Image (cartoon, helix red, strand yellow):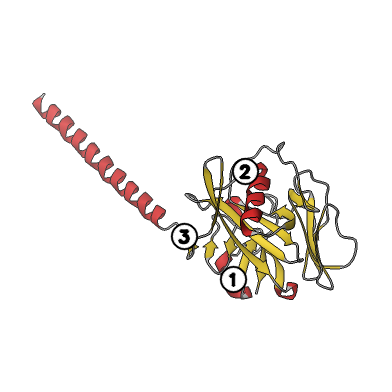
Amino acid sequence: MKRRLLLLIFLVIFIYLFFQKHIVNDSSNLVQKSDQIASPTPVINQAQNEISKENITYFINWFRVEDTKNFFLIPNFQEKLSSEEIIKNKSCKYLSSAGFYTTDNKPIGLFYTNNKKYSQDTENTIFNGFFYVSGDGSIFIDQKAPTESYRMAIQTGPLIKFKSNYLDLSNLNNDSARRNVLALSNDGKIIILSIYKTNSFFDGPRLQDLPEILTKYEKENHFILSDVINLDGGSASVFKNDYAYLTELTVVGSFLCYI
């Protein structure tokens, strides 16, 4: 009887030690795998413009395109390159995410660049605007797809400001996220802005908050944006200028590169 009891106790101890050893090893492996996942680290070298709305403070970084000959729309739907690779391969001085894409890696709506049309324009209540650069370098933000010849074109949205009037976005139901927008200045230049919360580089305003935030930004910086359209934001967005490099968490579908 005592012998059986001793054997039982020995067996229980053996099983306990066996599973304890494997559980510790599995936990160690999980930590090692987690450490191998590289989290992008945004780089900020200078204080940004700050705009507050409803007790939330946002940073705004931006860059201006002086010459559209050095401005390019780069597809990344199939290539799935990182922004760091795009900057290196294309010699981009400034960079932004561009348009939206579907789960099967296709652009939503019109996408044209490098003499190739990747997709046709489509009716969409959210992606309801078009940005394009004509053959002579003229730039447009419009509600209708271009009919004349163009060097690059992208359908995106929603339109935020059109013909100097901010649009009503109050009916949009969306979460907060970092927002990249493309705007035209009064002197006909492209300006790309990135808007995000001061305590989280990947979080930012809701779409319906953008008209008020951008209005304040215009007043504080003493210039007017004639047209503004939304670009892909959130975790699948990137932004780089002289002072900030806001990296992506997930694959960016396409890029706007200024060299």
Q: Residue at x 36, y 51 (%)?
A: 31
Q: Residue at x 60, y 65 (%)?
A: 81
What residue does disc 3 label? 41
User: Residue 227: where, in percent of width, then height?
Assistant: 76, 56
Q: Residue at x 26, y 41 (%)?
A: 20
**Dots 1, 3 in contact, CB < 8 A:** no
Q: Residue at x 86, y 53 (%)?
A: 144
Q: Please say whether residue 180 is visible from this viewpoint.
A: no
In primary-sequence order, the first of circles 2 and 1 is: 1
How packed mark 2 is, by other alpha carbons closer than 10 Å (few <14, some 14-19, many 20 or more), is some
The foreground one among 164 and 83 is: 164
User: Residue 119: where, in percent of width, then height?
Assistant: 80, 58
**Real-space Cα separation, disc 1 to disc 3, in angstroms:** 16 Å
What residue does disc 1 label? 87
Amino acid bearing label 1: Ile
In the picture, the quarter occupied by the N terminus is top left
Q: Is residue 183 left or right of residue 62?
A: right
Amino acid bearing label 2: Arg
Amino acid bearing label 3: Thr
Q: Please say whether residue 64 is visible from this viewpoint.
A: yes
**Real-space Cα separation, disc 2 to disc 3, in angstroms:** 23 Å
User: Residue 91: where, in percent of width, then height?
Assistant: 61, 76
The foreground one among 31 and 84 is: 84
In primary-sequence order, the first of circles 2 and 3 is: 3
Of the residues tagged 2 and 1, which is closer to the observer? 2
What residue does disc 2 label? 206
**Real-space Cα separation, disc 2 to disc 1, in angstroms:** 28 Å
SS type, badge 1: helix
Of the residues tagged 2 and 3, which is closer to the observer? 2
Q: Is residue 86 left or right of residue 142?
A: left
